Image (cartoon, helix red, strand yellow):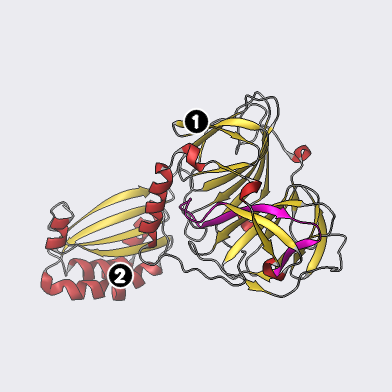
């Protein structure tokens, strides 16, 4: 965000393995090591940020390597009077500016409005954005970012400080104010006696893997019910108050102007034993919005059915069997009512199977088919197309067997 032009390539190689390594690193880090104090002493002085006016000070609180998702950074700092961040945009990241005090002139795609703190303004990917402090007081500022690809960032400056920009009385871009009177108790996301909450932004606002932006208040003497980060990670910034947090089996104290984070699958609980409310800004990030779980919660009824058919296919028939699947079996199923999809699996070679200590079997091919329900699968079996397809498959095999399953979950990312 700070450099004139910056492009950092994501780590090459197998991304899922890389994410797993990062997740293990996160879980290995102690809770106290995750808590970072927003210390003004550590701020760096900067001028003409993105060709903006005046001066500001900034530091990074949480970086790109702390979480396993594509969370890129949490920056914080002070924008001095008559100073700001110039008009610029990103191809690969999405940010969210936060002002904790005062009033700022925010620009999105060349349209400027005044926004009063405490407030948030999302900066969507490809949208030009800027912030200018026209007042005589310093402005305390946060900036959260999530990248399209792990660890990759970019920016393009437009050479416009937005000083003296025309002001729209009503913003024509998304923004939100953190006001306690908009929070509600007895909510499912943050259950607990008296715990107040509002989801300020949901996943539809962003194109990257942002999932939610929540405003949470835990009153003095109250605790949140433990909740598990199921399918997402969270970054927390303490706006006011203090509390004890527990993540898995560790506990630590937090206070105003500190931040911390929770990883995938971790259990979080917060207990406010102080005299003042604990106020939090909570950012949620999913591993992949495009490749998320097809079923997010356990099903009561099956989503579909699946049939697995195992075959023993002689070596001399292998090529013909694979061709048969694409040229006969798939076309015959595609026209059937309720057909969901299918796969053709070929057994690993013997040496590789031994290496992974696979169960020994003489069945060397499997066809998996899925229908929305068993009734439609049986209609397929009774069809003329099935008679032709099954005859083609079975004639190339010396033996076969099958099993049926109810589909109670899937993660099909094709």
Q: Residue 91's spot in the image, x, y percent?
A: 59, 71
Please state which of residues 69 and 338 is positioned toward the viewer in this rendering. Answer: 69
Write down the region rendered in magenta.
61-87
Please state which of residues 296 and 280 is positioned toward the viewer in this rendering. Answer: 280
Residue 63 badge: none
Q: Is residue 178 visible?
A: yes
Residue 329 badge: 2
Name the residue carrying label 1: 251
Q: What residue is rendered at 30% in x and 76% in y?
A: 327
**For residue 242, what is the image quadrant?**
top right
Q: Secondary structure at mark 1?
A: strand
Please state which of residues 392 and 150 is positioned toward the viewer in this rendering. Answer: 150
- Left or right, 214 with respect to 305, comes to right
**Count of numbered labels shown in the rendering:** 2
- Left or right, 391 with respect to 40, comes to left
**For residue 217, what is the image quadrant?**
top right
Please state which of residues 385 and 168 is positioned toward the viewer in this rendering. Answer: 168
Q: Is residue 408 visible?
A: no
> Mark 1: few, some, or many residues within 10 Å (few <14, many ≥20)?
some
Q: What residue is rendered at 25% in x and 66% in y?
A: 390
Q: Where is 221 relative to 391, above or below?
A: above
Q: Residue 126's spot in the image, x, y percent?
A: 64, 70
Q: Where is 248 relative to 361, above or below?
A: above
Q: Residue 89's spot in the image, x, y percent?
A: 65, 70
Q: Is residue 76 magenta?
A: yes
> Mark 2: few, some, or many residues within 10 Å (few <14, many ≥20)?
many
Q: Quadrant of the C terminus?
A: bottom left
- Left or right, 115 with respect to 288, comes to right
Chain-order first, disc 1 or disc 2: 1
């Amino acid at each position: 965000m700070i450099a004139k032009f910056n492009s950092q390539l994501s780590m090459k190689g197998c991304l899922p393995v890389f994410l797993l390594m990062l997740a293990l690193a996160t879980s290995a880090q102690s809770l106290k090591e995750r808590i970072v104090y927003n210390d003004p002493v550590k701020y760096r002085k900067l001028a003409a940020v993105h060709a903006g006016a005046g001066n500001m000070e900034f530091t990074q609180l949480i970086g790109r390597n702390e979480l396993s998702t594509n969370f890129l950074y949490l920056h914080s700092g002070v924008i001095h009077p008559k100073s700001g961040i110039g008009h610029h945009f990103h191809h690969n990241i999405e940010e969210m500016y936060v002002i904790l005090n005062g009033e700022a002139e925010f620009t999105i795609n060349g349209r400027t409005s005044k926004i009063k703190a405490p407030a948030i303004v999302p900066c969507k990917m490809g949208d030009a954005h800027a912030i200018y402090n026209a007042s005589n007081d310093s402005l305390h500022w946060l900036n959260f970012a999530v990248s399209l690809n792990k660890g990759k960032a970019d920016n393009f400056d437009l050479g416009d400080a937005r000083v003296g920009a025309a002001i729209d009385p009503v913003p024509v871009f998304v923004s939100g104010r953190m006001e306690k009177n908009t929070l509600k108790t007895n909510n499912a996301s943050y259950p607990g006696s008296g715990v107040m909450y509002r989801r300020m932004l949901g996943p539809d606002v962003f194109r990257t893997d942002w999932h939610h932006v929540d405003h949470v208040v835990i009153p003095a003497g109250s605790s949140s019910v433990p909740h598990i980060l199921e399918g997402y990670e969270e970054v927390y910034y303490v706006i006011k108050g203090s509390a004890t947090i527990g993540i898995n089996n560790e506990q630590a104290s937090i206070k105003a102007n500190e931040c911390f984070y929770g990883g995938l699958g971790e259990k979080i609980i917060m207990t406010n034993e102080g005299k003042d409310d604990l106020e939090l800004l909570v950012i949620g990030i999913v591993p992949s919005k495009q490749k998320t779980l097809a079923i997010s919660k356990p099903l009561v009824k099956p989503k579909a059915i699946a049939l697995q058919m195992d075959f023993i296919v002689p070596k001399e028939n292998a090529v013909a069997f694979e061709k048969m699947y694409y040229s006969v079996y798939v076309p015959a199923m595609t026209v059937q009512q309720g057909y969901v999809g299918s796969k053709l699996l070929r057994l690993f070679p013997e040496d590789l199977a031994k290496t992974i200590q696979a169960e020994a079997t003489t069945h060397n091919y499997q066809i998996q088919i899925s229908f929305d329900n068993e009734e439609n699968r049986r209609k397929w079996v009774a069809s003329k197309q099935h008679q032709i397809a099954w005859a083609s498959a079975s004639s190339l095999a010396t033996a076969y067997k099958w099993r049926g399953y109810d589909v109670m979950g899937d993660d099909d990312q094709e």
